[in-house]
Image: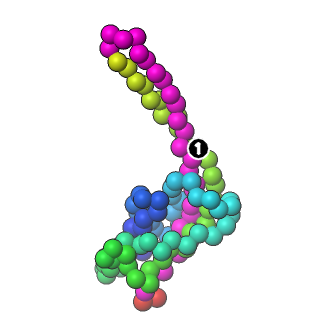
């Protein structure tokens, strides 16, 4: 089974048992997370596409870990003015494990 879901303004592909890195969620490590914004579900040869979401479909996930991503350097430069700025940023993320994809007919 395969699904496309939306969380925090981003869309992700999900299969049961996969671990996905998403933007940081304010839930404890090891707790359950239900995702209701499912855009597409593919089960065998049947595909259900939502308008915008598939009604009755949800994804049951578990938060595996929290962390910070790799450092991204931001560099600003303006010529002939001696203007240079360097700034770093590390985005917080949560790893979730997809336990089950629930479809409207199951």
What residue appears at the point 53 percent right and 67 percent down from the top-left corner?
98
Which residue does the numbered mark 1 point to in the structure image? 68
Quick check: 68 above or below 61? Answer: above
Q: Residue at x 37, y 71 (%)?
A: 39
Q: Is residue 32 left or right of residue 1?
A: right
Q: Quadrant of residue 51?
A: bottom left
Q: Secondary structure at mark 1?
A: strand
Looking at the rendering, in which quadrant would you find the N terminus?
bottom left
Between 98 and 11, the one lying in front of the other is 11
Foreground: 45 or 28?
28
Query: Is 86 placed left or right of 78 in the picture?
Result: right
- Asked whether, in this view, residue 104 is left or right of residue 66, the answer is left
* Along the viewing direction, whichever of 102 and 26 lies nearer the viewer: 26
One can see residue 36 in this view: yes
Magenta-colored segment: predominant secondary structure: strand
Residue 10 placement (x, y as % from top left) = 41, 58
The residue drawn where x is 51% and y is 55% is 22
In the image, taking residue 88 as reference, residue 28 lies left or right, namely: right
Name above or below for residue 98 compared with residue 82. below
- The span shown in magenta is 79-104
Number of callouts: 1
Say if 6 sits above or below 45 in the image: above
């Amino acid at each position: 089974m395969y699904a496309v879901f939306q969380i925090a303004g981003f869309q992700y592909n999900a299969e049961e048992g996969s671990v996905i890195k998403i933007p940081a969620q304010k839930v404890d490590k090891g707790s359950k997370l239900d995702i209701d914004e499912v855009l597409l579900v593919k089960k065998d040869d049947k595909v259900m596409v939502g308008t915008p979401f598939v009604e009755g479909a949800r994804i049951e996930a578990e938060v595996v870990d929290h962390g910070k991503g790799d450092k991204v350097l931001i560099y600003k430069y303006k010529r002939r003015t001696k203007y240079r700025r360097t700034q770093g940023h590390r985005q917080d993320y949560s790893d979730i494990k997809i336990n089950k994809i629930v479809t409207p007919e199951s």
